[in-house]
Amino acid sequence: MNVDFSAVLLSLVAFCGLLWLLDSLLAKKSRVQAVEDFKAGQGKGKSEEDISAAIADLSREPLVIEYAKSFFPVLLLVLALRSFLIEPFQIPTGSMIPTLEVGDFILVNKYAYGVRLPVIGTKIMDVDEPQRGEVMVFFPPHEDKYYIKRVIGLPGDTIRYENKRLYVNGDLISEEYEEDIVVETSIGDLPGTLHTETINGIEHATQHITGVARQRARTTWVIPAGNYFMMGDNRDNSADSREWGTVPEKDIVGKAIAVWLHKEPGLHLPNFSRNQAIR
């Protein structure tokens, strides 16, 4: 089950804030009045200790209001951090291997590509645009959950991927063979190769399965205005723009900047062995 934590946080902030506001406008006046009435009448002739105890009891806020006032600023701060600055994200699949592994916890810069309102994602301030080679988190056009891939094509670009080679606007992207490897797939381990690819000056690792790759109906795409073409670094084992199309600017979440924690699937403790900047 996918949980929209921004929506949950926004709901909790609104709920706590509303309780605090209603208490300030309505119930608090009643408590103040009750204290004044006690001092004017029932408090006469009682000891100072009894008066203090009675006033404290009459002034006491309901427990739910105490919790709302305590949690509101904390939740508001967390919402602001997640919505406008940095959001944590866990890698669920192997489509970005070898750059990102299953179980990596990454940090996503939410303001790199513009400041957006939480939940609805409407951009309210421009900052910068995605560049080729950067790793981006977004909502794909076919599914309402976070995806993470590498930006390959910008608006107006012509992308061609054929025989395991990538072309951008007719230029072959540099890719150097590094070594033979074993590639994990859903049908078992297969022989593959590891490469170093350079896009827009950004060097990063990619891997391919040796021999027959996933067959795709198209090999060439022209990127519409306001859209981006995304691909996984695990080139023969990634569902990306080659299958479900380009990503509109409105569905961008942010730029992936660092791995800060890693946890192997299953009963394993988290560790910091893969802490690194993302390229």
Image (spheres, rainbow, N blue to C red):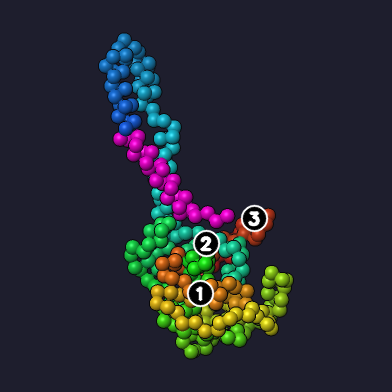
Q: Are marks 3 and 1 in contact (CB under 8 Å)?
A: no
Lower position in the chain sequence, tag 2 or tag 3: 2
The residues tagged by marks 3 and 1 sit, at their Cα atoms, a distance apart of: 37 Å
In the rendering, at what x and y percent does residue 134 appear?
48, 74
Residue 220 or residue 23, whichever sits in front: 220
Q: Earlier in the sequence, mark 1 or mark 2?
A: 2
Q: Nearer the viewer's eye, disc 1 or disc 2?
A: 1
Query: How many numbered circles are shown?
Result: 3
In magenta, the rendered stretch is: 1-25
Q: Secondary structure at mark 3?
A: loop
Above-or-below relation of 63 to 38: below
Say which residue label 2 marks. 145
Q: Residue at x 37, y 43 (%)?
A: 17
Q: Check disc 3 and report the residue beneath it.
A: 269
Q: Main secondary structure of the magenta part?
A: helix
Q: Residue furthest front?
A: 217
Amino acid type, residue under disc 2 in the picture: Lys
Q: Which mark is residue 245?
A: 1
Judge whether 2 appears above or below 192 on screen. above
Q: Amino acid at mark 3?
A: Leu
Residue type indicated by callout 1: Gly
Q: Nearer the viewer, mark 2 or mark 3?
A: 2
